[in-house]
């Protein structure tokens, strides 16, 4: 198994206000440390209008990280395409890919937070169409070295060539988050890599990987287990009391996310909202426990076909070192059940 990070940087840090920017510097140091410890990647979210200084300019932060690292893959999880001019976004993504030496993983999505749709004054009903137009336009921009024009529903461009070209060919891999069978099959058919959410059960994860793998093969695309990343929250606990306290802290943090995400007077929804109405549902499958307990949970995922896990690490650098020391070596070189069956 290989491990990466799933991060949500904030500008503030401890007693330091956001205008000090210390939280972003802490984020960079944390990821430099992760690279030295053998982590494969770091994926960062994009969010707006939260009131708690979450990272909003994700590609800028990843560019700073590109300058501090050499091997760490740099991922967005995810850039919400309805918020962005797709030509400017393609230019920025290609620039990051070049500067990083081809290390950019382009996670993209449609958006799910009510507060963001409201803030940008974009209708959720338009999210699918905006996403599709942006993907088609960025794909053309990445691959065409000839000038072209575009007249779509949301964007018009005339006589453009998008520069520079990216380092990776034909372009940085697209990653999408998906949960339903239909959305997983669409991702596989389009050649997108897949991010599976941190709240789903191991059984659900196993079923979703099988759907994705089968659809890719049916399309003649082949399958690599590293094309699927499974997100998980992590806390390596000293004992059960420590574990329970950490779970309570995580539940309070997640509730804050739910509050800015949910449409007023509406239950359910995508991503975290799909789990928020069940007591403890957003923490039920978190990797919270002693090293032996975390290893057992990871082994369950491995047996279900998981080879790549993105960790949201609670507790800072100490937790990062403990995971690298006590847990990562157990899974070094361990093949998944899916790999063994190849």
Image (cartoon, helix red, strand yellow):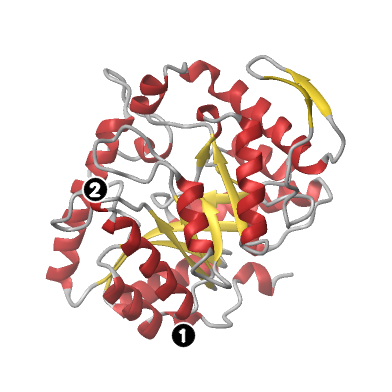
**Residue that appears at 70% across and 36% down:** 138
Find numbered disc 1 in the image and state the secondary structure of the residue it sits on: helix
- Residue shown at 73% from the left, 31% from the top: 136
**Which-is-in-front pick, marks 2 and 1?**
2
- The location of residue 131, given as percent across then percent down, is 60, 29
On the image, numbered disc 1 is attached to which residue? 329
Percent from the top left, x then y, of residue 322?
32, 80
**How would you rate the neighbour count of disc 2 (Cα within 10 Å): few for under 14, some for 14-19, many for 20 or more?**
some
| Residue holding disc 2 | 18
In depth, the one of 98 and 55 nearer the eye is 98
- In which image quadrant can residue 233 be found? bottom left
Q: Residue at x 83, y 27 (%)?
A: 148
Q: Is residue 58 left or right of residue 105?
A: left
Total marks in image: 2
Marks 2 and 1 in Cβ contact (< 8 Å): no
Q: Quadrant of the N terminus?
A: bottom right
User: For this view, does 93 lie left or right of residue 196?
Assistant: right
Instruction: Please tell me whether mark 2 sits on a helix, a strand or a loop.
Output: helix
Residue shown at 59% from the left, 72% from the top: 336
The mark found on residue 140 in the picture is none
Q: CA distance from mark 2 to mark 1?
A: 37 Å
Q: In x, y percent, where is residue 134?
A: 65, 30
**The one of 94 and 36 positioned closer to us in this rendering:** 94
Residue 50 screen position, x and y as percent: 28, 35
Asked whether residue 174 is in view, the answer is no
């Amino acid at each position: 198994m290989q491990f990466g990070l799933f991060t949500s940087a904030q500008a503030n840090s401890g007693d330091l206000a956001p205008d000090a920017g210390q939280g972003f510097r802490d984020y960079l140091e944390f990821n430099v440390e992760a690279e030295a410890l053998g982590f494969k990647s770091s994926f960062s979210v994009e969010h707006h209008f939260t009131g708690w200084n979450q990272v909003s300019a994700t590609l800028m932060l990843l560019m700073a990280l590109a300058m501090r690292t050499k091997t760490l893959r740099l991922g967005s999880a995810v850039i919400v395409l309805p918020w962005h001019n797709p030509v400017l976004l393609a230019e920025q993504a290609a620039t990051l890919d070049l500067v990083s030496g081809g290390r950019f993983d382009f996670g993209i999505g449609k958006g799910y937070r009510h507060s963001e749709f409201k803030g940008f004054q974009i209708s959720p009903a338009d999210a699918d169409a905006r996403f599709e137009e942006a993907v088609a336009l960025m794909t053309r921009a990445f691959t065409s070295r000839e000038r072209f024009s575009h007249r779509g529903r949301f964007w018009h461009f005339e006589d453009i060539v998008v520069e520079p070209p990216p380092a990776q060919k034909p372009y940085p891999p697209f990653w999408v988050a998906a949960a339903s069978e239909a959305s997983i099959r669409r991702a596989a058919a389009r050649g997108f890599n897949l991010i599976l959410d941190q709240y789903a059960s191991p059984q659900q994860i196993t079923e979703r990987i099988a759907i994705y793998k089968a659809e890719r093969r049916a399309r003649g695309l082949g399958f690599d287990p590293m094309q699927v990343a499974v997100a998980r929250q992590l806390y390596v606990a000293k004992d059960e009391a420590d574990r329970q306290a950490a779970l309570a802290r995580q539940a309070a943090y997640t509730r804050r996310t739910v509050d800015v995400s949910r449409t007023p007077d509406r239950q359910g929804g995508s991503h975290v909202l799909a789990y928020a109405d069940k007591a403890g549902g957003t923490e039920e499958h978190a990797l919270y426990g002693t090293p032996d307990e975390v290893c057992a949970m990871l082994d369950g995922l491995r047996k279900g076909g998981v080879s790549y896990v993105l960790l949201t690490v609670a507790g800072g650098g100490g937790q990062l070192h403990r995971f690298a020391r006590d847990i990562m070596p157990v899974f070094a070189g361990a093949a998944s059940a899916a790999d063994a069956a190849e």
